[in-house]
Amino acid sequence: MPPAESQSLRASPAIAAATPKRWWREVWDVIAALGGLAYWGVVGLFITAISIPLIILLPCPVAKKLGRGMLHRAFRVFVRYLRATDLVHADLKSLDALKDQKEPVIIAPNHTSLWDAVFVISKLPQPICIMKEAILKNPFLGGGARLAGYIPNGSSAGMVKSAADALQNGGQLLLFPEGTRTKRDARWINPMRGGCALIARKAGVPVRPVFIRSNTRFLEKGWPLWKKPELPIRLSFELGEPVIPQEGESAHDFTKRLEELFERNLSRAHKLRRQVEEA
């Protein structure tokens, strides 16, 4: 018997598509979406504004801990808002197991959408993140990311060293092994890059894959910002077993092993399995 799925993921897409929305639901979706944008406009700018003096005044370890905690709480409130307004039904229960993991670990999800990190960080009080260098200049997220000590992905050698050092000091590193959001023409995932393997080998830590599934390609690579998705959006986050670099295993071989694991898992039968995009 297949494992029971959460209540929020049971609705059949075919039934949902066949049921016309009431006019008030269309209006509600627009208002709720604008409310979410307003939340990030206010909270993002506030965190950026207070981050600058905190970076100057506080010792580096204290500032990083404070910054990571602030972003975790901001993301957690946002995820609760999405659930309360019925914009998104996200099954995140699997990620609760990470709260009890004390040893350093790399958390490696597939990258389905622009906001994947928001949902994962909402479950992790003190994550270390590798992010695009351009985000550090973003007025809504840059200040908090700098305060939290998030690692830019600019220089490969510098990124690997910074990430390995952070892990050896204890922590949970969030890293997307695809390097970018899954492209529209990819069947399951993009070809994985070697950064995850290099960091895992250098720091001597396991990788915990996270398999993300969705009923939409909203905010995927190439998704037009003006295009409205079918609401509510349904997401599933499934935490995999640790993958440990084997003795003598090259970074290339470890990356291929991890890539095959993702393809095998994401291709199995599931109500939110990725669909071939229609032309």
Image (tube, grey):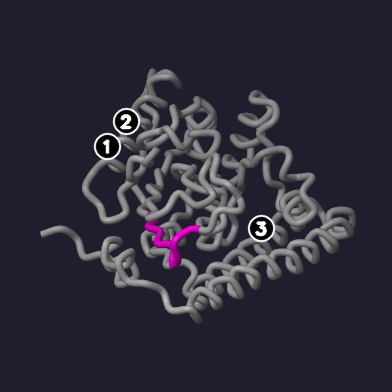
As measured in the structure, the alpha-carbon distance from the residue carrying label 1 to the one carrying label 3 is: 33 Å
Question: Which dot marks residue 264?
Answer: 1
Q: Earlier in the sequence, mark 1 or mark 3?
A: 3
Question: Which dot marks residue 68?
Answer: 3
- Let me know if residue 233 is in the magenta part: yes
Span highlighted in magenta in the image: 229-237
Q: Are marks 1 and 2 in contact (CB under 8 Å)?
A: yes
The kind of residue tagged 3 is: Arg
Image location of residue 8, percent across then percent down: 34, 70
Residue at mark 2: 260
Q: Which residue occupies 37% across, 41% down?
A: 278
As measured in the structure, the alpha-carbon distance from the residue carrying label 3 to the one carrying label 2 is: 32 Å
Kind of element beneath mark 3: helix
Image location of residue 180, percent across then percent down: 55, 36
Q: Nearer the viewer, residue 14 or 102?
A: 14
Q: Earlier in the sequence, mark 3 or mark 2?
A: 3
Q: Quadrant of the C terminus?
A: top left
Kind of element beneath mark 1: helix
Query: Toward which corner of the image does residue 37 lie, by quadrant?
Result: bottom right
